[in-house]
Image: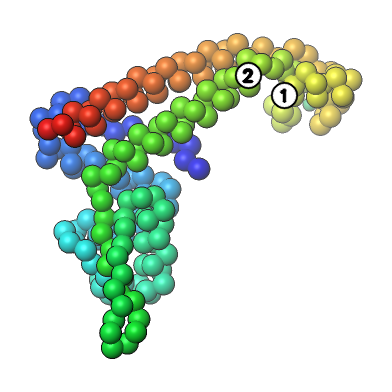
Amino acid sequence: MIQKEYIPTASTEVSANLEMDEQERQTLLDMVEDVAGMEVRKVAILLLDHEDEVTDEILAEELNVKLDEVRKALYKLSDLEIASFRRIKDKISGWYIYFWKIHPERINEIVLKKQRQVHWKILERLQFEKENMFFSCGNKDCNRITFNEAMEFDFICPNCGNRLEDFDNSRLIMVLEKKASELERIIDENQTRLKIRKQS
Ligand SMILES: [Zn+2]
């Protein structure tokens, strides 16, 4: 789902805990906005401002939006594993009251998980590029196609009718390999940082 690589800007220094928390906060909010949009970001900010758990009704009041909208946003945050809730049955009304809490400390693990997913996708793509031969008509509006597809079309572009020629994907492979190794390095660094933080 997420194509962007969320790379925390935090330095490798672990001592500056407070500073890192602010960066984590920013990383968290940026990720929330990218994935779920501005409205969900607003809810996340409000949740962060409440140090303790808070009901969806209070959040709706504070944001001056409909309860349904806040709930939708909260469930998105829950899907992202950034927020969680517990519910209590109101003895008088019989309705459930939902208490929500945000988990900013999870952001590093969430980022790491996303990075691993992106890394895996790059590796899959790399394999596809390496295992296939490609053909192209050279026309920017047409897609390149694999050898088998080109055979089917007698090496004539199915889109524009031009002749299909060899398509050299070696540069693309190089770019993907570079991306993959950069990401590996970042994942390694983040893993180490998480381990150090957990120990301290
Ligand atoms: Zn074409």
Closer to the camera in the image, 164 or 11: 11
Dot placed on the residue nearer the N-terminal end, 1 or 2: 2
Task: From this view, report whether residue 68 is shown above or below residue 146.
Answer: below
Say which residue label 1 marks: 144
Callout 1 crowding tier (Cα within 10 Å): few <14, some 14–19, many ≥20: many
Q: Is residue 110 visible?
A: yes
Disc count in the image? 2
Q: Secondary structure at mark 2?
A: helix
> 10 Å neighbourhood of mark 2: few (<14), some, or many (≥20)?
some
Q: Which mark is residue 40?
A: none
Mark 1 against mark 2, which lies toward the viewer? Answer: 2
Q: Amino acid at mark 1?
A: Arg
Seen at 24% across and 41% down, the residue is 24
Looking at the picture, which amino acid does disc 2 mark?
A: Glu
Distance in Å between CA atoms under marks 1 and 2: 12 Å
Tell me the SS state at disc 1: loop
Judged left or right of residue 45, residue 114 is right
Give yes or no for contact between labels 1 and 2 (Cβ–Cβ under 8 Å): no
Q: Which mark is residue 129?
A: 2
Q: Position of residue 30 (x, y in %)?
A: 33, 45
Residue 37 is situated, as x and y percent measured from the top left of the image, at: 41, 53
Residue 114, x across and y down, in percent: 41, 37
Q: Which residue lies at the image location 27% right of the left edge and 67% below the top edge? A: 99
- x and y percentages locating residue 113 in the rendered image: 39, 36
- Relative to residue 170, is residue 8 drawn left or right? left
On screen, residue 97 above or below 48:
below
Q: Residue at x 18, y 28 (%)?
A: 196
Instruction: Check mark 1 vs ligand 1: CB closer than 8 Å? yes or no.
Output: no
Question: Which residue is more in the foreground, 43 or 52?
Answer: 52
Point out the quarter of the image occupied by ligand 1.
Answer: top right
Looking at the image, is 31 positioned above or below residue 191?
Answer: below
Position of 105 relative to 71 (above/below): above
